[in-house]
Each structure stands twice: as C-alpha cells, then as structure tokens.
Image (cartoon, grey):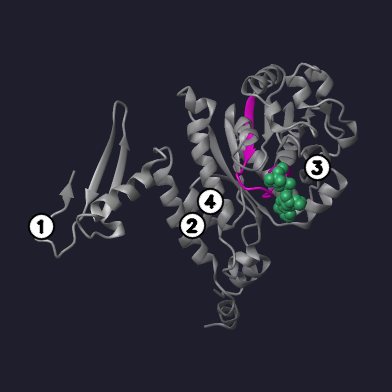
C-alpha cells in the first residue's frame, strides 16, 4: 500500500516545493519507489526544482482528463530511477482539478508506488484542499514567523475536519512539523520565534528543523534537490527528516548557532 | 551581566511579543473553528438588543457553542452591571 504525504502550509513561499523535492528524493534514494506530484496548477515550479522542466510533455490535468495516460506523463528523475515527477499544468486554471479525478490518479499511482508526495499550493483554496484530501500523512512546513505559524494552525484545522480520513471517520491524518528557514543566531538574539515558541502553539511531532541556508538557492539554480548536496546543512537536515519519518531516531541538529555553542563552551549564558 | 548579555539586550527582543500575540490569536481562532459562522454576528446582535434595556459592556455577554454526538447547544451568559440591584448573572 502506498502512503500519501501532503506537504502543506497555508502560507506561500515557506519552502513546500523545496521540501517536497528533497523528501521525495530522500525516500527514493533509500530504496522506496516514490512519485512527487505538483498540485500548483497554473504556477508549476516543482519541475524546475527537480531540473526536469525541459522534459515535461504531458501533465497532471492531461491525465485527469484522459488526454494522456500516467506512464506518458510521469517523468523519471535523472538522478534516481526510483523517483518520478508528475508536473502540474502551466496553462489551465485550477477548476480543471476535481476530487474524483485526483482520486483516480492517486489510486492508480498507489498500485505501483510506495510513497506519493503531494506538493500543495499556498492558500486554502481548491488546489490546497485537493492536495491534502487523500493524504495519510501531512508535513506542515512552517517558518518561525507569526503569519506562517497562524496559517499552519489553520491548515491543521482543515486537515482534521475536511480530509477524506476525517469525512470517513477513519484514523486522522498524521501531522508532522517541519520548521524551515530557521536562523539560530536570530533566535538567540530574541528576534525570531524559537522552536519552543512555535511548539508551544502548534505542539506537533517534530520531523526536523531546516536551517536558513545558501545551499537551497544554489540547489534550485542547478535544478537538483538540496538533499543531494550531502555536505550542506540543509541537505543534511532533510536527510535527517527522511530518516526520522522512516522510523530512525536521530538527534535534532541546527538548533543552535555557532556562537551559542561557543558561549556554552566558555560557560557564558 | 556579561558583555554578551549587554549586546543581546540592546537588540529588540520582539520574538516574545510575537509569541504572545500568536497565543491569543490562535486560541481565538481555534475556538471559532468548526462552529457556525453566524456566532460572532449573533453575539453582536444580541448585545444590541440587550443594550436597549440594560447598559452592559462588550464583554459582559458570552455565547458558548457546544457539540456532542447527539446534540448542539447554545449557551448564553450575560452579566448585568454592578449598579443593578440584581448582581447575579442572568441566564437564558
Ligand atoms: N531553508 C531555506 N533556506 C534558504 N532559502 C530557502 C529555504 N527554504 C526555501 N527557501 C527559499 O524560499 C523560497 C520559497 O521556497 P519554495 O518555493 O520551496 O516555497 P513554497 O512554499 O513552495 O512556495 P509557494 O507557496 O509559492 O509554492 C525559494 O526562493 C527558496 O529558495
Ligand atoms: Mg511551491
């Protein structure tokens, strides 16, 4: 049975697509056949982050409308042959997505894949709703910032009441927190919400903290998911996230700044 | 106070303000979540009606919506001002 993961946030620009690309690659690299779907109809970006934009022929909507079959639309990743990308349509509007259509595509994918990662668009409109509707697990991507935390909380309310699992009275979606663009220096100087602050409000199972990192831009410039930059802090943080999701215990890293570390070393406060 | 603390305290520590604001806001939004959307307006209009007769504060009235498996209840609580002879809350 496939596990369907939605990467969601409510707020835009917090790192959903970066995260979707990284964890899909991470799962595939660890031997799980994985598909990653771009639900951002009209504003597709996942293809760019995955570096397959020039190989897009058919898209998600074509498959829903029966204009292409799944095998024609799925793009095999150039770095990992267990990873496939289903791009969003660039031209049509969001109304082309339907609950039945999405359900049918996911059902067909589930026969062949172990993990299906759904990259949600921002907002709480149709695209975001359909991205989370069939999910088993939700990765709630949050930045340490007021509007992002508030939107994450709203999204949690939607996951708990509007999803298929909620409607059918099944076991609820498992919710995980991914705190991204975290800057320990700014947290220590009191300018940025800390992990504890965010958890006091959301109290979710923490999958990982992704530091604010230059490597994310470098990776997106090159069209390679940042998790493949194994020496970068963000790459390592995403590798930890995948390992924890698969049940490994790993201590959290990148919570403390180098300054904070030295301060502890020399007995300062 | 160490030198480091001095430099730190000279920066604006706005994160704690952010956290407090969020706690209040999120609690409020959670309360109204999955409740009828007419609740805030109902509260407003009830307040208007009551004010025709008694001079009560904005926060003297609370509308509680509760839901369990087989019924939904609306509980209305109005606290009358001190000056009134009747000091006990009026329950409807
Ligand atoms: N950990 C990070 N460090 C630095 N920059 C980051 C990090 N994560 C994401 N970014 C940058 O933030 C921007 C938004 O990222 P991304 O596109 O992944 O967000 P999104 O949530 O998918 O946005 P949208 O809501 O528009 O779909 C990008 O420019 C990305 O490079
Ligand atoms: Mg995106």
Q: Quadrant of the C terminus of chain B?
A: top left
Discs 1/4, front? 1
Residue shown at the point (48%, 33%) measured from the top left: A161
Badge 2 crowding class, 10 Å Cα cut-off, few under 14, some 14 to 19, many 20 or more, is many
User: What residue is pinned by disc 3?
Assistant: A49
Q: Tell me how far mark 4 sits from mark 3, CA to CA.
A: 27 Å
Q: Tell me how far mark 2 sits from mark 4, CA to CA.
A: 7 Å
Q: Tell me how far mark 3 sits from mark 1, CA to CA.
A: 68 Å
User: What residue is pinned by disc 2?
Assistant: B22
Q: Are marks 2 and 1 on the same chain?
A: yes
Mark 2 and mark 4 residues within 8 Å of each other at the beta carbon: yes
Residue shown at the point (87%, 33%) measured from the top left: A78
User: What residue is pinned by disc 1?
Assistant: B86
Q: Say whether residue B28 is left or right of residue A42.
A: left
Label 1 chain ID: B
The answer to whether the beta carbon of the residue marked 3 is less than 8 Å from any atom of ligand 1 is yes
The answer to whether the beta carbon of the residue marked 1 is less than 8 Å from any atom of ligand 1 is no
Mark 4 and mark 3 residues within 8 Å of each other at the beta carbon: no
Discs 3/1, front? 1
- Say which mark, if any, is on residue A62: none
The verdict on residue A5 being magenta is yes
The answer to whether the beta carbon of the residue marked 2 is less than 8 Å from any atom of ligand 1 is no
Discs 3/2, front? 2
Tell me if I can see residue A234 in this picture. Answer: no
Label 4 chain ID: A
Q: Tell me how far mark 3 sits from mark 2, CA to CA.
A: 32 Å
A193 or B81: which is nearer to us?
Answer: B81
Q: Secondary structure at mark 3?
A: helix
Range of residues picked out in magenta: A3-18
- Say which mark, if any, is on residue A150: 4
């Amino acid at each position: 049975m496939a596990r369907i993961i939605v990467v969601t946030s409510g707020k835009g620009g917090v790192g959903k697509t970066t995260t979707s690309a990284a964890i899909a690659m991470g799962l595939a690299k660890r031997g799980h056949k994985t598909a990653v779907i771009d639900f951002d109809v009209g504003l597709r970006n996942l293809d760019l982050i995955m570096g397959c934009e020039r190989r897009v022929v058919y898209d998600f909507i074509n498959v829903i409308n029966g204009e292409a079959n799944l095998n024609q639309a799925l793009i095999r990743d150039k770095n990992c042959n267990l990873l496939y990308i289903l791009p969003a349509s660039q031209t049509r509007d969001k109304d082309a997505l339907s609950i039945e259509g999405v359900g049918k595509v996911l059902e067909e994918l589930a026969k062949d894949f172990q993990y299906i990662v759904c990259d949600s668009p921002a907002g709480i409109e149709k695209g975001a709703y359909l991205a989370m509707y069939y999910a088993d697990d939700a990765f709630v991507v949050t930045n340490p910032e007021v509007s992002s935390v508030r939107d994450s909380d709203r999204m949690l309310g939607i996951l708990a009441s509007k999803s298929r699992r909620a409607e059918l009275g099944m076991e609820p979606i498992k919710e995980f927190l991914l705190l991204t663009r975290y800057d320990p220096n700014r947290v220590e100087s009191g300018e940025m919400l800390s992990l504890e602050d965010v958890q006091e409000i959301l109290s979710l199972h923490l999958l990982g903290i992704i530091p604010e990192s230059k490597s994310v831009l470098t990776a997106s410039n090159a069209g390679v998911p940042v998790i493949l930059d194994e020496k970068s802090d963000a790459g390592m943080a995403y590798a930890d996230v995948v390992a924890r999701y698969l049940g490994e215990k790993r201590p959290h890293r990148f919570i403390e700044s180098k300054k904070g570390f030295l301060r502890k070393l020399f007995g300062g406060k | 106070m160490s030198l480091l603390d001095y430099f730190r305290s000279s920066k604006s520590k706005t994160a704690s303000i952010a956290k407090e604001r969020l706690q209040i806001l999120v609690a409020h939004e959670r309360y109204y979540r999955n409740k009828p959307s007419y609740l805030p307006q109902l509260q407003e209009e009830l307040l208007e009606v009551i004010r025709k007769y008694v001079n009560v504060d904005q926060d003297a009235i609370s509308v509680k919506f509760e839901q369990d498996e087989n019924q939904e209840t609306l509980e209305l609580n109005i606290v009358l001002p001190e000056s009134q002879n009747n000091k006990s809350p009026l329950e409807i």
